[in-house]
Amino acid sequence: MRRVAWLANALFWTAFAVLEGVNHGWLAVVLAVVFFIAPDLTFLAGAKDAHKVEKGRLPPRAVPYYNAAHRALVPVALIAAYTFGPLTWAPIFAGLCGWLAHISFDRAFGYGLRTKDGFQRR
């Protein structure tokens, strides 16, 4: 049931990112796509050690970066700050929607935060 809720959340934020892209142009689309992809670039922090760990495990060096980029509270807090703050540039909001969509899809498909050793948390 939790995964279904995450999937609904992912679809909502994806639709919102698409809507922002349609309403505000190519820069909003670019930021939404970049922020959708960016959390997984944290894998690169452990690329040097990737050959030393077993399949499905993240190199411990990359775990803090991965976990920081995959905590839903971070983009939610930034969306709240954007909503109530003085900054009103729509492409930023589109990017935050893309980031939250990424995290939500990860959770919907069973990927979550990692332990210090790089394994999936249960």
Image: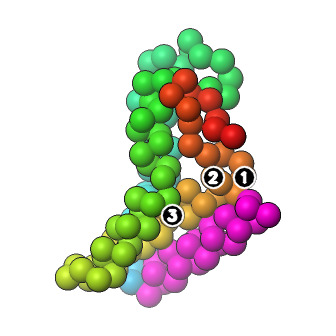
Disc 1 marks which amino acid?
A: Phe
Residue appearing at x 50%, y 75% in the figure: 17
Residue contact between numbered discs 1 and 2, judged by CB atoms under 8 Å: yes
Residue on which the image places disc 3: 100
- For the N terminus, the quadrant is bottom right
Q: Residues within 10 Å of mark 2 (few under 14, many from 20)?
A: some
Query: Is the image coloured rainbow, by chain, by secondary structure, or in one colour?
Result: rainbow
Residue on which the image places disc 2: 106
Q: Main secondary structure of the magenta part?
A: helix
Q: Residue furthest top?
A: 52
Q: Quadrant of residue 25?
A: bottom left
Do we see residue 1 in this rendering?
yes
Residue appearing at x 56%, y 12% in the figure: 52
Between the residue at mark 1 and the residue at mark 2, the CA separation in whole angstroms equals 5 Å
Residue appearing at x 47%, y 70% in the figure: 97
**For residue 102, above or below residue 29:** above
Circle 1 SS class = loop
Residue on which the image places disc 1: 109
Could you tell me residue 100's position as x and y percent?
A: 51, 64
Name the N-terminal-most of marks 3 and 1: 3
Q: Residues within 10 Å of mark 3 (few under 14, many from 20)?
A: many
Q: Residue furthest front?
A: 122
Q: Residue furthest right?
A: 1
- For the C terminus, the quadrant is top right
Circle 2 SS class = helix
**For residue 120, above or below residue 112:** above
Disc 3 marks which amino acid?
A: Leu
